[in-house]
């Protein structure tokens, strides 16, 4: 006989696996994402006062990952309005350790001030004014990891969404991710939704998901954690939750 909690976990796992096989349900989820995108649905939410520009489902998934991994360092490329940086910093505050590196080629002054004046900023280090793939940025991260003996590193890629840029980020930042942790790539949904990106340099065939597909052909340290996608159904990162297994 199983105890109640073990039974609950087993039923949860079975339900998630079954809903992941429900093509009709998955189509409804994808239709929702396509339909709501015209209203910028992911822009609706805040974390501790700052816009986070993520879906609630992905926020919950990242909470679970951070709690399980308990990283010493979280690296996020693409800072935007600071909500995700504050979210990761607040999770590290609850865990009792860790720092978030936020990297963006253009951190607008009002967004920087909002982060710097936030109570969670003590767990944050910002690198602005440089592309995430510039050597001087990578050197700063390498120095921090070596100096602070970071045993567990988690990486989130959410900057320029072109195939070339994301593939460069994957090849560079995957080296920092430690076994058992994650390399999370957002906005892979670009490949799946019926949205026109006429004012953007990315679109179908040229986006984070195509970069992941290319990356995984030549890197066996990571696998797509499909269970997370099956759990969420509605996510900005289909095939984007990469677990480091080596």
Image (cartoon, rainbow, N blue to C red):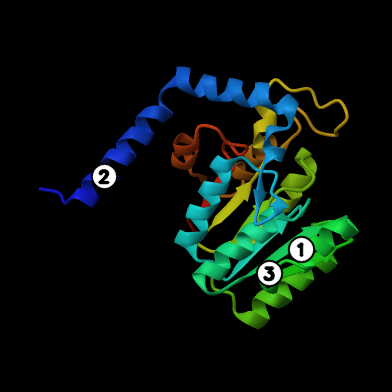
List x then y, in percent, for residue 48: 65, 57
Q: Residue at x 75, y 50 (%)?
A: 168
- Label 2 Cα neighbours within 10 Å, binned few <14 / some 14-19 / many ≥20: few
Q: Nearer the viewer, mark 1 or mark 2?
A: 1
Q: Is residue 99 above or below residue 148?
A: above
Nearest to the observer: residue 201 or residue 87: 87
Give the labeled residue for mark 1: 115
Question: How far apart are the alpha carbons under marks 3 and 1?
Answer: 8 Å
List x then y, in percent, for residue 163: 76, 39
Left or right of 14? Residue 73 is right
Left or right of 46? Residue 21 is left
Give the labeled residue for mark 3: 119
- Label 3 Cα neighbours within 10 Å, binned few <14 / some 14-19 / many ≥20: few
Give the labeled residue for mark 2: 8
Residue lying at the far top of the rendered structure: 24
Question: How far apart are the alpha carbons under marks 2 and 3?
Answer: 37 Å
- Label 1 Cα neighbours within 10 Å, binned few <14 / some 14-19 / many ≥20: many
Nearest to the observer: residue 149 or residue 222: 149
């Amino acid at each position: 006989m199983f105890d109640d909690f073990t039974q609950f976990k087993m039923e949860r796992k079975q339900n998630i696996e079954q809903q992941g096989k429900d093509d009709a349900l998955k189509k409804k989820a994808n239709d929702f994402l396509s339909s709501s995108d015209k209203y910028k649905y992911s822009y609706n939410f805040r974390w501790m006062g700052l816009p986070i520009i993520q879906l609630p489902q992905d926020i919950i998934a990242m909470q679970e990952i951070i709690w399980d991994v308990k990283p010493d360092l979280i690296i996020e490329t693409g800072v935007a309005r600071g909500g995700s940086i504050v979210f990761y910093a607040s999770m590290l505050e609850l865990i009792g350790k860790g720092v978030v590196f936020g990297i963006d080629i253009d951190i607008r002054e009002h967004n920087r001030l909002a982060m710097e004046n936030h109570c969670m900023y003590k767990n944050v280090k910002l690198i602005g004014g440089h592309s995430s793939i510039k050597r001087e940025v990578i050197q700063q991260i390498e120095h921090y990891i070596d100096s602070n003996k970071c045993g567990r590193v988690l990486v989130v890629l959410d900057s320029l969404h072109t195939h070339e840029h994301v593939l460069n980020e994957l090849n560079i930042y995957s080296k920092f991710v430690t076994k058992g942790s994650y390399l999370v790539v957002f906005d892979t949904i670009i490949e799946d939704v019926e949205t026109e990106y006429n004012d953007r340099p990315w679109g179908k065939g040229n986006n984070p998901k195509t970069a992941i597909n290319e990356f995984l052909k030549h890197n066996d340290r990571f696998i797509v954690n499909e269970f997370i996608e099956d759990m969420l159904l509605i996510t900005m990162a289909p095939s984007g939750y990469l677990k480091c297994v080596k």
